[in-house]
Image: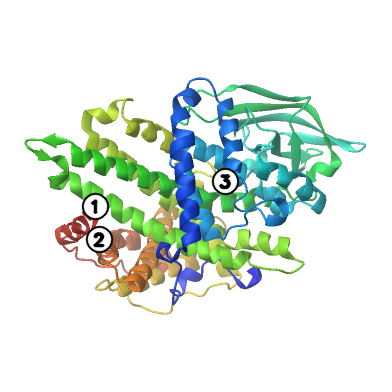
Amino acid sequence: MEATTRHTGAFLMQTPETLFTPEQFDAESRQMAEATERFVREQVMPYVKRLEHGEPAQMREILIDSAMLGLLGIDVPQAFGGLELPKTTSALITEKTALQPSFAVSHAVHTSVGSLPILLFGNEEQQKHYLPKLTSGEYIGAYALTEPEAGSDALSGRTHATLRGDHYHIKGNKIWITNAGFADLFVTFAKADGERFTAFLVERGPGLLIEREEHKLGLHGSSTCRVVFDGVAVPARNRLGQEGEGAYVALYTLNIGRFKIGAAALGIAKEAWRIGRAYATERKQFGHAIIEYPLVWRKLAWGAMLMYVVESALYRLAAELEDAFQTTGANRQQVWRDAAAHYAAECALLKVAATEALHQIVDDTLQIHGGYGFSEEYPIAGLYRDTRVNRIYEGTNEINRLNLVERLVLARRKDLWTPLQTQQTTTDTVEATIQTLRSLTGSALEGLQTQPELPQQIVEPLADALIALYLRDSAHARARQTAHPAHQAMTALYHEHVRRQLAGWSADLAAFTHTAPVSVEPKPQALNYEAVRDAIRD
């Protein structure tokens, strides 16, 4: 299916009759995931202490080793040495690479924002020259976008490129550049003649200066440096796309990067949850394992539910992206660009949902450990530090909430989706709650069409309602397909949570929906928690 027939915001109108779920993975995909997990546990985790104590270059060797499994080319076409995996399998592999966060971020930068710009915007010569090197590990990639004065407002960057003869000369500073300490190729953004925001492929060499490693809160095993471009000469043939197209290169790539962050966040969350459950099972107080106490097992039940709804949304979106990327025509590259653009809202949504679920699960796991959780002798302390950045990089969650709402308003102006024509405001069943959410969010987005600028005071409640709709819809559809008791139990727990939030969201959005707030009478959650507890005991 061509990407031009796909669009953002379809979830505001209807639920797919079927959607892809993790239960549908074939044996080959599962074997690849198992091999990736073994690699991370056996070939990465033993080196964490060395990585975290002044040997970041060791990460380069690990990345090169991972190329032997094909892990540096999971999204790259086979013609360039990659595996060209379906987006569903790619997400599953990304989950497994995330078991060690420093490796996860190093790997993700190389395989997504460090390689995908060439796939989406590179000409044939650039693709043939660089993609096989990146896929094999001969080159390690980095992404140089952020500047000291240009973070969320990336297009205001001051780095500039001046064309002299057949070379651009780039001058400026970039900060927070992952893999900078050992990268060979930097996807770099600068303003041609100080005006046209443009992307370049810059190889390590004269004029490119790498400053000291940043002293970060977490991810101590990854390399993060400031990069100075001191008049570095870049061949004109290494310009990526046309002058002035840099915004498209940056944003389209970041859209897919956010999807990958969602997958990685889910993988880390599963590891943290596993650690928490294992500790709660082993730790005894007052004669009982602490997992037997409701104030502990309820945290685990809540975490299991969060992972379930995020996982349902992740693989729904992965399959939709895969459909949108599918093409065999001569315009393959344009189809890929369109696909990356058309799902910008959903990718932003998933990034926020997954990273905030991760935060809750890691925090609860540390709490389950009590005082031991505050000790670096236990792995949860490191995970707590390492995962905090997920809500910041590749667009803060505040920026991604704005992106989510802005993209859906824009899609409405283009008539890509139509508001649900119903006055239904009941929450008696899951289906009714989903329809109420569709009506509420659709009406609010419709009301925002005439606003010259989004009023930020309603962006958060509207974005949260949209996130709840997508997760609620995905989780319910999955439970309906699988009929698995655990899925049904977690769906019920999330449903009541969403019901309770609806009243507040509808009150906050009333000025734009022109309807009275939804009245919700909360129902007891105890039985829902117990059903999830019983389901996760097995």
- Look at the numbered disc 2 and give the secondary structure of its residue: helix
Taking 393 as reference, is 186 left or right?
right
Q: What residue did someone put label 2 on?
A: 493
Alpha carbons under labels 1 and 2: distance apart: 9 Å
Kindly identify the amino acid type of the residue bearing the numbered disc 2.
Answer: Leu
Instruction: Find residue 98 and report its horizontal and vertical position in percent.
Output: 46, 43
In the rendered image, the quadrant that contains the N terminus is bottom right
Which residue position is annotated with label 3? 69
The amino acid marked with disc number 3 is: Leu
Give whichever of 384, 506 is nearer the camera.
384
Q: Amino acid at mark 1?
A: Ala
At 79% from the left and 36% from the top, the residue drawn is 161
- Position of 311 relative to 179 (above/below): below
Q: Which residue is mark 1?
A: 301
Q: Given contact means CB atoms under 8 Å apart, are the residues at marks 1 and 2 in contact?
A: yes
* Residue 313 image offset from top left, x and y in percent: 43, 61
Q: Is residue 159 something that shows in the picture?
A: yes
Q: Quadrant of residue 384?
A: top left
x%, y% of residue 88? 51, 60
Determine the CA span between mark 1 and mark 3.
Answer: 35 Å
First in residue order: circle 1 vs circle 3: 3
Of mark 3 and mark 2, the one earlier in the sequence is: 3
The span from disc 3 to disc 2 (Cα, nearest Å) is 39 Å
Closer to the eye: label 1 or 2: 1
Q: Residues within 10 Å of mark 1 (few under 14, many from 20)?
A: many
Disc 3 secondary structure class: loop
Q: In this view, which residue lies farthest toward the left?
A: 287
Q: Secondary structure at mark 1?
A: helix
Query: From the viewer's perspective, is the residue at label 3 or at label 2 nearer?
Result: 3
